[in-house]
Image (cartoon, rainbow, N blue to C red):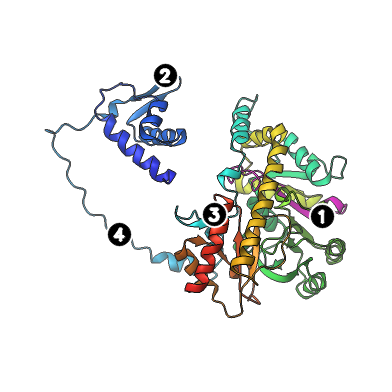
Amino acid sequence: MNERSSVTELADSLRREVERYPEGRKLPSSRALMERHQVSPGTVSRAIAVLAAEGLVVSRPGAGVFRTAAATATPASSTAPRPAPPVRPGDLSWQEVALSADSGPRDTGAAALIATLTVPPPDVIDLNGGYPHASLQPERLLAAAVARAGRRPGAWERPPVDGLTELRAWFAREIGGANGPLGAGDVLITAGGQSALTIALRSLAAPGAPVLVESPTYPGALAVARAAGLRPVPVPVDEDGVRTDLLAAAFDATRARVFVCQPLFQNPTGAVLSPARRAEVLRIARTAGAFVIEDDFARRLVHTDAPALARPLAADDPDGVVVHLNSLTKATSPNLRIGAITARGPALQRLRATQVVDSFFVPRPLQEAALELVADPGWARHLRTLGAELRDRRRVATAALRRELPGLLGPHRSGGYHLWLRLPDGTDESALVAAAMRAGVLVTPGRPYHPAEPPAPHLRLSYVAADSQALVTEGIRRLRQAFEDR
């Protein structure tokens, strides 16, 4: 049963049961409720929380859960309340004028971003999501880290604006190496990678300015750019990463001062920037007097059969050209929204100012929990386990595609969590995605990944959000069925 429906059903049952209790009566223990209703501890806890929010019960730590006076049922002899008068529906049409009066309608492309965050119905296999399924998350490590963090001295005091020094130093070592060029003073802690990307683009480019982006690229980067009033300009990507010949031409044509790239396991193509092009990207950006925003989102999603990873671009940049973005979220849980921006010089001051205006700082307990997590001996084990599972899921997915949909699978790498499928010319992506949904599998159309007209139809297939490897295989079988039924 879906957990959400289990919580609702248990809350309904307990709501009826509590009405029969006298005021102050203690409810059965959580263990008794688990056994009676055959539900998990989390379901019991959430159902009790629902009743407590309604004022029907009160939870007393160490003592139990008790019925409150507010739970007293209305006597049958009391006068029934008068029905409320009908509520006139509001007229919201004025907002269309207000939102468009100054600059016209704006489409940031957020719909594509929201779609990747959509939780599918229980009977639909998720080959769309970008966060690991709960079975791949280090839930015990996270729970222990949060518990220890809450007991740290000063855990609930206001943190430094830039973030905890120890956490900033950890990110600096992760990015630049133990004896590398980066220190804690070069790092700003952010509320995850998306927040880091938003801060970077809003800080480094003025509204109306062009910003160079890979094509195809992460829709969240396009949405951030458009929301900030920037003009995304595409630079094509091939198997070796961004085309540096076209990057130089794009800088010359636009006079842009920012280029956003994902050198490692690029989303959606999976491309890894080649060694020769790494040096070229930095040289071209320096010549143009431009920043490179390095979105290093997939470094902790490397598979166990991958060759040694190249260092981040930021580790080979003494001149402050690279603004590096990094996050713990993808490798842990969507709720551990801890990321970092690494920058040097006046750019870091600009980044800090933008974050302060937006959100002041990242909550200290979350930063303390992140420190506890990465210091735990289980952290390295988790990354190895995750890498092995991602390797196996990639193998299962590629084998199923070769069997069910031969010809669609392009080049792929031992990292990340997705595959980029080239569809036959003339394929209607939207119709195929709709047919897949009817067949019981959620996949992502390729169109939102392109800042301009796409050269061909594609699908992005994620293998990290499904419940199991078996469901990845079944999802691809359903996708083949969708091809046949559309």
Instruction: Look at the numbered discs 4 and 3 and tell me whether their residues touch, using CB distance below 8 Å.
Output: no
Under circle 1, the secondary element is helix
326 lies left or right of 87: right
The residue under label 3 is which amino acid type?
A: Leu
Residue underneath mark 3: 471
For marks 3 and 1, the one nearer the N-term is: 1
Task: Write down the quadrant of residue 28 in the picture.
Answer: top left
Magenta extent: 312-340
Residue at the image point whose x is 40% and y is 31% from the top: 34
The residue under label 2 is which amino acid type?
A: Ala
The disc placed on residue 89 is: 4
Q: Nearer the viewer, residue 318 or 378?
A: 378
Task: Check the image and report above or below for 177 versus 286.
Answer: above
Whole-number angstrom distance, CA of label 4 to CA of label 3: 44 Å
Under circle 2, the secondary element is loop
Q: Position of residue 42 (x, y in %)?
A: 46, 35
Label 3 Cα neighbours within 10 Å, binned few <14 / some 14-19 / many ≥20 = some
The disc placed on residue 265 is: none
For marks 3 and 2, the one nearer the N-term is: 2
Residue underneath mark 1: 313
Whole-number angstrom distance, CA of label 3 to CA of label 2: 43 Å
Residue at the image point whose x is 71% and y is 38% from the top: 381
Q: Nearer the viewer, residue 277 or 441?
A: 441
- Please tell me whether mark 3 or mark 1 is closer to you in this view: 3
For marks 1 and 4, the one nearer the N-term is: 4
Residue underneath mark 2: 63
Task: Check the image and report above or below for 458 versus 331.
Answer: below
- Please tell me whether mark 4 or mark 2 is closer to you in this view: 2
